Image (cartoon, rainbow, N blue to C red):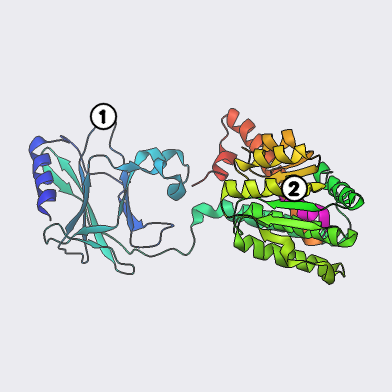
Amino acid sequence: MSKIASWITVTVMALHVAAGAAMPLAIEVYDTPNDAGGSLTLTWSRAVAGASSWYSVYVATAADGPFRLATTTATPGLKSAEPGLFGYDDDNDGYHVLHISDYATGNGEERESLKDGTTYFVRLGVQTAAGEVVGAALSATPRGNLFNTSKWNNLILGIGLSFVILLYISMARRKDLFIRRIAGLEALDEALGRATEMGKSVLFVHGLKGMDQIPTIAAVSILGRVAQRTARFDTDLRVANVDPVVMSVSQEVVKEAYLQEGRPDAYRPDSVFMAATEQFSYAAAVEGIMVRDRPAAHILMGYFYAESLLLTETGSTTGAIQIAGTDSYTQLPFFVTTCDYTLMGEELYAASAYLSREPKLLGSLKGQDVGKALIIGLLVVGTVLATFGVDTLTHLFAAL
């Protein structure tokens, strides 16, 4: 036992912190559920109301000892505070709980961690007016758990949502599924057609995020659909980039789009270029292109910051059709104010399925929408039940 632990025990005995306390009942020790191993859990009946006790836990590798101090406390936790391990039973308030992961070695203040597969003997001590009363030794073996059973609700939700998505993908292969009209995407052909009639270019502007970000992936996917149409209409397409990786990916996407339309000769590598690598240098370069070249259509897709208003204000002065899309809620007001059409939030992600009508994308989109609707329905039902004191559904979906 360490010097500090010995001093605490002697002091508590001298002060009789828990005068008249008796040995707790229903003492149990077992491997801690849902953990990675190296831990035991000790539970016992809660002290009677108003009583104060000081508890000590001793650990040994043999039934006859020597027993070493693992922990000592006057305020052990309750089962009810850990619903992930013990559930929501009403009687959980009547049991204390302690988790043991190491114990004193007896050499100064050094401690030794519990080892998986080793059987340990645990004794609970409670301080009384006459001294410390120590219970019988109970044995348990710590082990790692392959599954965290408190997360089963996530597993069920994941399997259920995956099933719904696969079902809708299967349906999308047999028939065309309905997606509500998205005005900004419907206007793409109008914008590209106008650029073709006027003999002017189309300017595609990426946001500032890298290729590892979802908004950029969605923007590049939309770029592929735009490039197919510009190749079909023989319209000049210019793509301004702020990130070299995004530029490389965009070049390949545009090149593939022209190849699919049977126009590989019309693809110009320099049409997809680096405008700048810094936020406002990029904004200034793109604004310069808007003012000098006066493209007929500006398509801004991705994640934008403070440069959004600079770009779209400049673009609006040139008379171009502007279609923007972002999931940055702080920039949406600027796009809505200055652009002809704006894709808001998840409409940016839905664009690929909307434009291509590809079964996998379309089925995934519809399946996710159904899943969201089911979750919203469960939230409403759970709220109503909780209002009347029925917490079953609330507990099923609790984050543990």
- Three-letter residue code for mark 2: Arg
Residue 315 position (above or below residue 105) = above
Residue occupying the far right of the picture: 197
- Earlier-in-chain disc, 1 versus 2: 1
Residue sitting at 80 percent across and 65 percent down? 257
Q: Which residues are magenta?
A: 349-358
For numbered disc 2, what is the local secondary structure?
A: helix
Residue sitting at 38 percent across and 44 percent down? 79
Q: Main secondary structure of the magenta part?
A: helix
| Residue placed most toward the observer, 331 or 100 | 331
For numbered disc 1, what is the local secondary structure?
A: loop
Q: Is residue 191 magenta?
A: no
Image quarter of the N terminus? bottom left
Q: Quadrant of residue 213?
A: bottom right
Residue 312 percent across, percent down from the top left? 71, 40
* Location of mark 2 (residue): 292
In-image side of 146 versus 282 (left or right): left
Find the distance from the CA under tag 1 to the CA under tag 2.
82 Å
Residue 50: mark in rendering:
1
Residue 261: mark in rendering:
none
Residue 332 in view, yes or no: yes
The nearer-to-camera label among 1 and 2 is: 2
| Residue placed most toward the observer, 354 or 297 | 297
- Crowd tier of the residue under label 2, counting other residues whose Cα lies within 10 Å: few below 14, some 14–19, many 20 or above: few
Residue 335 percent across, percent down from the top left? 71, 38
Q: Quadrant of residue 103?
A: bottom left
Q: Is residue 350 magenta?
A: yes
Residue 11 percent across, percent down from the top left? 9, 41
Residue occupying the far front of the picture: 292
- Three-letter residue code for mark 1: Gly
